[in-house]
Amino acid sequence: MAEPLIPQQFIDSADLMYQWAPALASAIESGVQALLACVTGGGKILLCGNGASGALAQYAAALLVGGLERARPELPALALGTDAVTLTAVARRGEYADSIAAQVRALGNAGDALVVLSSNGESTNLIRAAQAAHERDMTVIALTGRSGGELARRLRDTDVLIAVPPAHIHAAHIHAAHLLAINGLCEGLDDQLLGNEENSA
């Protein structure tokens, strides 16, 4: 009988999000400021992740370009690793683990931002993508789980780490927290660009 488990999943998820809110709020605000500096400086936002995190990267790019709820000019954002033709063409030149980093090197410029989503921070291709961003003098915003792993250890002082607090948790809960963080980043960025709706009402 799976039915009783479903309400419990909602309850457990809501409880975790409530616990994590204080720890994540400050980091998300730092991420908003980093994205604001990027787009107001004429930069673009590149995003990447693997599997479910890659899907979240696409979702974030869609919100940045198309907007969350309020009408505003489109923001330059692109999810990397979503084009199988480009991904495999780059991978066959060398290691697959370098395929996203190659796209960062091809598209990234100083002043741009790279948003990296990883549930554990240990994926080699994402770590290399962050390194490539640093080579291009880009800011890295990492959304991770647990301690952030090797990805967190490679971040610079000017980067932003949004790490779901260490806990005995499933990857699905990390992804759910990342979804809320993405919404928070996009809504916070809209508030900075358009003004806070509550204050203007």
Image (cartoon, rainbow, N blue to C red):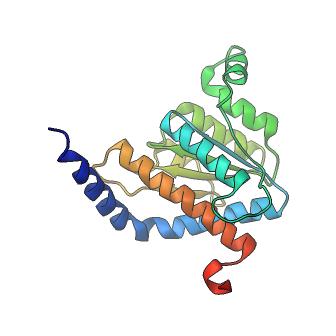
Residue at (26, 58) in percent of width and height: 11
Residue toward you, 130 or 72: 72
Residue 168 drawn at (x, y percent) = 27, 49
Residue at (65, 38) in percent of width and height: 129
Residue at (57, 51) in percent of width and height: 142
Report whether residue 115 is seen.
yes
Q: Quadrant of residue 16?
A: bottom left
Q: Residue furthest left?
A: 1
Lateral position of residue 25 relative to residue 71, left or right: left
Q: Quadrant of residue 183?
A: bottom right
Q: Quadrant of the C terminus?
A: bottom right
Residue 100 drawn at (x, y percent) = 66, 32
Residue toward you, 66 or 24: 66
Report whether residue 145 is seen.
no
Residue 71 drawn at (x, y percent) = 73, 64
Residue 102 drawn at (x, y percent) = 73, 30
Residue toward you, 91 or 79: 79
Residue at (66, 47) in percent of width and height: 62
Height in image: 177 above or below 128? below
Residue toward you, 43 or 13: 13
Q: Residue furthest right?
A: 42
> How many badges with numbers are in the image?
0
Q: Quadrant of the N terminus?
A: top left
Height in image: 38 above or below 81? below
